[in-house]
Amino acid sequence: MCNGCVQKEYPDRGNTCLENGSYLMNYRCCASCHQRDFVLISNKATEEEDGEEIITYDHVCKNCDHVVARHEYTFSVVDEYQEYTMLCMLCGKAEDSISVLPDDPRQSAPLF
């Protein structure tokens, strides 16, 4: 991972969790070849561990194959919620939780 390639390390992305793709707004340029071109995805792997799906891949420079950042995305179901997390020097850090029920109990108004 290369902090010279990004404008800000691990920017806070709120609840925006990317399963694939790249956050190019945070990409400065390749610190190795100094080109600002597309970032490719390589070494993508998916594994399941204890009911949690983990997707990892590398963001690499299109021109020189320099590794810009390592991306990790996780998905799991905990109780009645789908939990998402993302951690990547380029794309940032984020967490999200969505109810699997039609109406999210956290969004309902109290009766009294």
Image (spheres, rainbow, N blue to C red):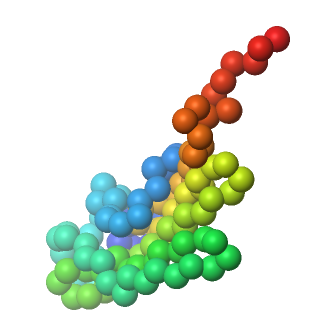
Task: Report which quarter residue 20 is drawn in.
Answer: bottom left
Task: Report which quarter residue 39 is drawn in.
Answer: bottom left
Q: Residue at x 20, y 80 (%)?
A: 62
Residue 74 position within the rendered picture, expressed as x and y whole percent measured from the top left: 55, 67
Judge whether 30 appears above or below 79 on screen.
Answer: below
Extreme residue in the front direction: 102
Q: Which quadrant is the C terminus positioned in?
A: top right
Q: Residue at x 38, y 82 (%)?
A: 44
For the residue pair 55 and 82, the one nearer the viewer reads as: 82
Judge whether 38 appears above or below 111 on screen.
Answer: below
Residue 81 position within the rendered picture, expressed as x and y whole percent measured from the top left: 63, 49
Extreme residue in the top direction: 112
For the residue pair 36 and 14, the one nearer the viewer reads as: 14
Q: Residue at x 75, y 18 (%)?
A: 110
Marker count (numbered): 0
- Whether residue 57 is visible, yes or no, is yes
Q: Which quadrant is the N terminus positioned in?
A: bottom left
State left or right for residue 98 relative to residue 62. right
Residue 18 position within the rendered picture, expressed as x and y whole percent measured from the top left: 41, 60
- Whether residue 8 is visible, yes or no, is no
Task: Report which quarter residue 7 is drawn in.
Answer: bottom left
Q: Residue at x 63, y 79 (%)?
A: 49
State left or right for residue 10 relative to residue 77. left
